[in-house]
Amino acid sequence: MNGKKLHEVYIKEQKWSGNNVDLVVPKGDVFLMGDNRNNSSDSRIIGPVPNSDISGKVSVRLFPFSQFRTF
């Protein structure tokens, strides 16, 4: 991310085995990644998403229950 390898120590599952690519996300777009990396159809598959396609924001975290909170 931003020219540096992203170390995601919080991910316990096997790392995604897709090809490593350098990608510049265009201005006005975002690169979205699912929290279940091995079972997510996210920007690694569909590419960057225009900001105009985002229609909401996260306001509640339900799981894990011990970390339930609103934003």
Image (spheres, grey):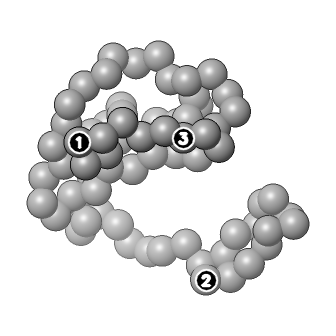
Q: Secondary structure at mark 1?
A: loop
Q: Which badge, 3 or 1, is on the more N-terminal residue?
A: 1
Q: Which residue is mark 1?
A: 3
Identity of the amino acid at label 2?
Phe
| Residue type for callout 1 | Gly
Question: Residue 70 location in percent, x, y?
Answer: 68, 82
Residue drawn 69% across and 33% down?
A: 12
Residue 68 position by quadrant: bottom right
Whether residues under marks 3 and 1 lie with C-beta atoms below 8 angstroms apart, the answer is: no
Q: Nearer the viewer, mark 2 or mark 1?
A: 1
The numbered dot on residue 71 is 2
Query: Can you see residue 44?
Result: yes
- For the residue labelled by badge 3, is the local secondary structure a helix, a strand or a loop? loop
Q: Give the Cα separation between the discs numbered 3 and 1.
A: 15 Å
Vertical relation: 37 (above or below) 31: above
| Image quarter (top left, top right, bottom left or bottom right) of the C terminus | bottom right
Q: Residue furthest bottom?
A: 71
Sooner in the amino-acid sequence: mark 3 or mark 2: 3
Q: Which residue is mark 3?
A: 8
Q: Residues within 10 Å of mark 1 (few under 14, many from 20)?
A: few
Check disc 2 and report its element: helix, strand or loop. loop
Please state, as top left, top right, bottom left or bottom right, where the N terminus lies in the image: top left
Left or right, 21 with respect to 69, comes to left
Neighbours of disc 2 within 10 Å: few (<14), some (14-19), many (20+) = few
- Image position of 26 (left or right of 1): left
